[in-house]
Amino acid sequence: MNELAIELRDIHKVFVTDSNRVEALAQISLQIAQGEFVSMIGPSGCGKTSLMRIVGDLETPTKGMVRVLGKIPEAARRERLVGFVFQQPSLLAWRTVEENVRLPAEVFGDAEILSRVSEMIDIVGLAGFEHAYPRELSGGMQSRVAIARVLTFRPSVLLMDEPFGALDEMTREKMQIELLRIWQATGAAVLFITHSISEALLLSDRVVVMSARPGRIAEDLKVNFPHPRENTLRADPQFVAMETHLREQLEG
Ligand SMILES: Nc1ncnc2c1ncn2[C@@H]1O[C@H](COP(=O)(O)OP(=O)(O)OP(=O)(O)O)[C@@H](O)[C@H]1O
Ligand SMILES: [Mg+2]
């Protein structure tokens, strides 16, 4: 199995509405290996979410080729190889933590997924909160519920669109370290969208920088810091230098 987790070749996306024609993505080619963690940063409206939706089969490209573990996105989705985590954790208010995490198992009617519910609640550090309702949880805890929920069906590819965007700085830093731990435990490939350069650097094997609309790949930067990574890495001179470089790229 040396299939790529995600392969994009020359992706273009044009949105046509009654009043408008928006060229969102142009000439996007990108390869993400299995188990690799890749972050994507770029100005608002450059097409990051659109690209992720194309990978997840929620949108189709105007032109170009997409493969997820060697399959077309529709097949990958059908086989539940891909999991999504959005900026808003989208939990059901009337369901407890456990009942929210059980949702995919119920939707798919799958006993094996069901059998992983408590393990995944444990992995994200929510043991003891199984019977709490979303309103009784902090923002970070709500994000963890969404992550636990997606992990129950063991996606090989995890698509995360600014999952920590709504969190305060302290919680966010904790969640980043948590996510690294979870990522290493699951071995999933991750495509992670963020507006935070330091978040991208701390988490990733590679940081992909997109240019303003139509989004193109302006840079694909390798990040070689060893694991496990800690928050103290942010003070490392090489980290700071890369951060400065990426900021200049984004502004330039
Ligand atoms: N369904 C749609 N119909 C029409 N236009 C769309 C649609 N989805 C996205 N667009 C347009 O495509 C462009 C890229 O949007 P997208 O949401 O992918 O950007 P983004 O990089 O995720 O931005 P942000 O950082 O603000 O989340 C925008 O100009 C947006 O208006
Ligand atoms: Mg977006």
Image: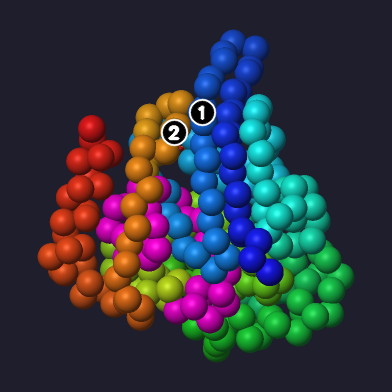
Give the image location of residue 222, x and y in percent.
35, 58
User: Could you tell whether 198 is left or right of 109 in the image?
Assistant: left
Compare marks 2 and 1 and give the one earlier in the sequence: 1
- Give the class, few, some or many, for how many residues have Cα within 10 Å of label 2's Cα (few <14, many ≥20): many
Looking at the image, which is closer to me, 207 or 21? 207
Up-down: is 13 above or below 171? above
Visible residue check, residue 145: no
Where does the magenta region start and end?
181-208
Q: Are marks 2 and 1 in contact (CB under 8 Å)?
A: yes
Q: Using the rendered image of the protein, determine whether residue 114 is visible from the camera's viewpoint.
A: yes
Question: What residue did someone put label 1 on?
Answer: 26
User: Residue 72 at x, y = what percent?
Assistant: 75, 48
- Mark 1, Cα crowd under 10 Å, few <14 / some 14-19 / many 20+, is many
Residue sitting nearer the eye, 188 or 140: 188
Q: Nearer the viewer, residue 128 or 169?
A: 169
Please give the name of the residue rendered at 16% of the width and 59% of the height, measured from the top-left corner: 240
Per the image, label 1 sits on a secondary structure element best described as: strand
Which type of secondary structure does the marked residue at label 2 adopt?
A: loop
Quadrant in the rendering for residue 66: top right
Image vertical order of residue 178 relative to residue 55, above or below: below
Query: Image quarter for residue 54?
Result: top right
Is residue 188 shown in magenta?
Answer: yes
Quadrant where the image shows the C terminus: top left
Q: Residue at x 57, y 34 (%)?
A: 10
Q: Which residue is mark 2?
A: 216
